[in-house]
Image (spheres, coloured by chain):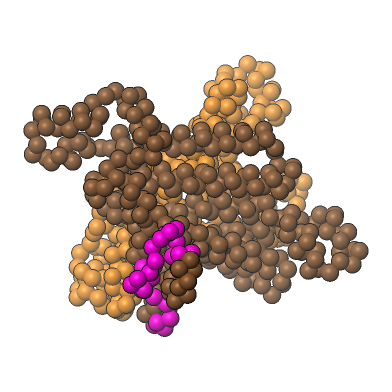
Chain colours: A orange, B brown
Amino acid sequence: MPVRGVVSPGSAGASMNATQRYGARMRGVGVLERVGIVVLLLLLAISLAAPLFVTDPVISVGPAFQPPSLQHLLGTDDVGQDIFARVMYGMRTSWLSAVAVIASAIVVGGLIGLVAGARGGWVDSLLMRLTDTFLALPGPVLAIAVAAALGASLRNTVIGIAVVWWPWYARLVRGEIRSLAARPHVDAARLSGVSRGRLMFRHLLPGAIPPVIVTASLDIQILVLTLAGLSFIGLGAPAPSPELGAMAARGADSLFTSPWIPLAPGCAVFILAVAANLAGDGIRDLFDRG
Amino acid sequence: MARFLLVRAFGAVGVLLALVTVVFLLQTAVPGDPVRASVGVNASDEVVEAERERLGLDEPLPVQYATYLGQVVRGGFGESLRTGRDVRDDIGAFLPATLELAGFSMLLAVVGGLLIGVLAVVSSRFATPARLLFVGGASVPSFLLALIFIYIFYFKLSWLPLSGRTSVADAPEAPTGLLLLDSLLHARPDVFLDALRHLILPGLALALVPAVAIGRVLRSSLIEVYRSDYIRTLHAKGLPPRSVLFRHALRNALSAPLTMAGLQLGLLLGGVVIVEAIFAWPGIGLYLNQSIAFSDLRAIAGVTLVVGAGYVIVNTLVDLAQAAADPRIRL
């Protein structure tokens, strides 16, 4: 990433109040990244509110294969469903699933990383060996296999991806915990007789949260793309449900006659991914510089 | 070096063992009763039990695992529920097409990635386009790219073919199964060109994301190298920028992009499933896609094992190549 005007971290903070510190942090975030954060939040809000202003995505609203018009912003598909409504619902499913994968990866990976980092010794070696083994396998292919074996459904696709996603968080959290464990405040806590559980959750875990947030925000883009890809090959909710990948796959047959049918959901994935990419960079800058 | 090689080889074997274990567990974790599903819902309990015994599924799990492991080590993946053939033979028939496609797009990705990364650093005019490419290129779903390519280059311009590996009826199929190679071996330039034309669109659709990722990593490691003292010394003693770049900077910046290329292979192999489906490319991605639609677990397991093993082996080789090139890389 290009090096931007860096606000001197830490040192200046002492003489600033909270608002000034926040302002200084925000200045470390580039314009494009800020736009990304705003667009992403906007997309999230619009897609969450979709039920309020678009038609039901699984009913026919008119003739099939209508090109985009004022009445149907993105036209209608092969069975006369409103594509704009379906894309809105699809985006919602898309980022909600991405959040679900990240949440489960953080819980599983975070716990493994926390235990490995805090206990050290053979527990650490064993857990990290396991983590590295999973990291060495080709994630997307394994995710496809898990999702396919469990049977095609949105829940199983989320599980399939989460199975290959947690090791990254385990590594990250473990590394953070190891470096935190060597800090004086942890020694002080240990010497004052704090229990092991309290030490882990009260004195070690909070320090690992910022890097986890940064990684999670960078992951949203990859997950949106991965989910769309799996949905495209039929691993996702069954047919009439509005999912971006599945919509593009079914619409591919009409590419030459009604190109908007497969291209609209594809472009929605692209826009969501670009916004998530920029927003992720912005959030990283926010934390790295702060 | 010998110790490094040994440890890495052992590590790879461990990972492969874990892969087999995961794939085995997947097959036992299937919801419902696959045996009943395969003999038919109306079969009597005796028939189901007999089939279960025949397949060895009445044994305790550790025994089943040992049997499966032995079978896989000997190269057997069992019989496909969909095609009725041995999964190994199916994969053998579909694999060459995928090897050709994946190899071609990996080549495009590496060349393209090097180009993007170097240009982004040395050319100030290219800095902004590169930035857009890094954000946009990494965000295009491969199916969207594939559909747009087909729409433009096949439908609108009629420059390139829509699907398949070749439109020549008597294209040679032996000895390697790789059309580009076989056509050269049989001295058929027409088939070679035709196969190349068929490769371009799916190859590009697969290559964009890894190319951008490689370019991005190369860019940051090049910038890092350019900040070091020895580069300043080279500039100061009057070495032309071109030799500084190609003879000194690039070599030391290649380690991270090489690792990235190995990692991207995993993503590319996932993308193969999508792109092969769109271009009706007769490879294991298409085979996997059809097996998913049929819930053909043995086929899915077989493909996962073969692809996973290929990925692990390639990445181990990348590690070894790096260790051979850079004596600082050790355990």
At 24% across and 50% down in the image, what residue appears?
B83
**Left or right of A268 on screen, residue A117:** right
**Left or right of B51 on screen, residue A210:** right
Residue at the extreme top of the image, as rendered: A193
Which is nearer the eye, B37 or B77? B77
The part of the image, by quadrant, that contains residue A151 is top left
At 47% across and 37% down in the image, what residue appears?
B16
Work out whether residue B87 can be spotted.
Answer: yes
Horizontal and vertical percent position of residue B42: 8, 39
The part of the image, by quadrant, that contains residue A5 is bottom right
**Left or right of A252 on screen, residue B109:** right
Residue at the extreme bottom of the image, as rendered: B157
Horizontal and vertical percent position of residue B209: 52, 61
Residue B160 forms part of the magenta stretch: yes
At 59% across and 66% down in the image, what residue appears?
B112
Q: Give the range drawn in magenta.
A: B156-182
Which is nearer the eye, B18 or A158? B18
Image quadrant in which the N terminus of chain A is located: bottom right
Above or below: residue A106 compared with residue A196: below
Which is nearer the eye, B223 or A158? B223
Above or below: residue A42 compared with residue B62: below
- For the stretch drawn in magenta, the main secondary structure is loop
Residue at the extreme front of the image, as rendered: B186
Work out whether residue B200 can be spotted.
Answer: no
The part of the image, by quadrant, that contains residue A150 is top left
Above or below: residue A36 compared with residue A209: below
Residue B256 forms part of the magenta stretch: no
At 44% across and 48% down in the image, what residue appears?
B307
Horizontal and vertical percent position of residue B313: 53, 44
Horizontal and vertical percent position of residue A47: 37, 60
